[in-house]
Amino acid sequence: MKQLALMQGQEIVKHYPLNKDSYTIGRSKENDLVFEHPKVSRNHARLYRENGHYVLQDLNSTNYVFVNGVRIKQKKLEPNDRIQISSDIQLLFLEEAEVMPEQDKGRTMMDIQRHFVHRDDLLRLKKVTQSVVLLNSLDAILMQILKEGISLTNAERGLIVLTDGKGQIQWKYATTYRIDRDKVEAGEADISQSILQDALDKRKTVVRFSENHASSAPPSESMMSLKIYSAMCAPLLLHDRIIGLFYVDARQLMNNFTEVDQFLFDYLADHAAIAIFNAKRYADLQAETQRLRVNLTELENTHQQLEERHQKLTDQIGKSDSGQTTPRVAAKTSTHAPTHTYCAGGVVLNADGEVLLIKQELNWSLPQGRIEIGEEPAVTAQRQIFEAAGISYLHLVQSLGSYQRDTQADQSRELQTTYMYLFSTEQKGLLSPDSSWLTPDEALLKLENTRDKNFFAEILSDIRQALETGPAPIQPPTPSIAPEFPI
């Protein structure tokens, strides 16, 4: 036997078994289902059986009839459909197997949500979350999540706004739908701002109505003044950190948010936080790659200019002499003129706070090597670390700057500029016997090249700070390379 369940706040308070072919619903006592409420018409709706199914019909009521948040004139009811006769009269259409026993009447809607969340909504939610995690554009992710959240909850307007590291709302990083973007940037949006602050403080989804509802927080003055009937806001949480807020509202009297809407909204907000974080990380990595490419181009141009100056000086010295001495002087000059090479390397920290050293030409040093043509310095550093010690997984923490070494052998000088990066890794095993993990103090004592030792001593405070605070995220890109997002 099919039944209608009357909802009051979060609880099912009454069941109406459907054992007749036709029922009338309204405020008049002549109806089969009587609801004495000012928003219910005298003859509001009719429920009748047709071909084994129940059909709900609106009898030209003043405040209409809604099924699953959509206004209907006539609709065949499906199991778990949510019916609204007014904002305060809500019914749930149940199959016989879904009728709750007397002892379970106190269970909330969230407790039994698996019984009436529509399969189409869940499939759509799954499709949305699968698609957004594949997007790399933050703007595209925010707009898709915003539109889907509004559609799933039958809201009218919405926005997603990001927060900074201190949890402060950054209005300039807001994505809006049917809300004035300029007003949002100025912090003057026509929304319930108190509900955003409430969601921030409570770290959970907040639902409000302009009228008193047992299942919602008290209405705010801003909602009543802006004629917002219902509003909902969820914090975007990632590892206990709020990275943004997801807000929707509606101004139609009958479009109030249900517990199922809140369930779908929460689920979408959780996946939105993950997608936003991944998009931000991707943007940071792209910006870092672009920055390194720019630096490499500048280094190549500088190197080319130095080579041209060197050749010009060599030619001038050769021309200043005459006769047979020219080749000899030129040869001597080129023999003693220093060559300039560019290298990259890294300081690698493992989970125990130890530093990686490798043995190169019988000397213990930090892993480093020459930058190949077209190769980015950070990539060179990772390649050298892998070739020297077999460490395949590295997390780039920050750039450590550069330093120079001046070496001389067999009447030739080499000026070497080395760009260094700080990495972290969870890998402890080393594939080469010529590599070793040492504490920072032990590593400082074991380094043999004076310039390497001096450089390591200079960045020792950065290493100790990284060990105390854990690996820091890659620094955000400069605005000239990529947009900055406050995540």
Image (tube, rainbow, N blue to C red):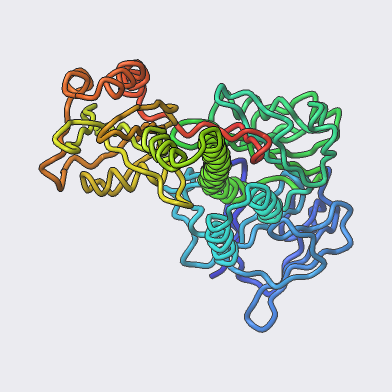
**Please, which residue is most extreme toward the front here?**
323
| Identity of the residue drawn at 40% across and 45% down | 371
Q: Is residue 394 left or right of residue 48?
A: left
**Please, which residue is most extreme toward the left here?**
433
| Identity of the residue drawn at 59% across and 35% down | 477
Residue 248 location (% of width, % of height): 71, 42
Query: Which quarter of the picture shows residue 72?
Result: bottom right
| Residue 137 position (above or below residue 457) | below
The quarter of the picture where the C terminus appears is top right
191, 129: nearer the viewer: 129
Q: Disc count in the image? A: 0
Q: Is residue 372 left or right of residue 187?
A: left
Residue 463 location (% of width, % of height): 33, 22
**Please, which residue is most extreme toward the bottom here?**
51
250, 73: nearer the viewer: 250
Task: Report whether residue 86 is seen.
Answer: yes
| Identity of the residue drawn at 82% across and 64% down | 58
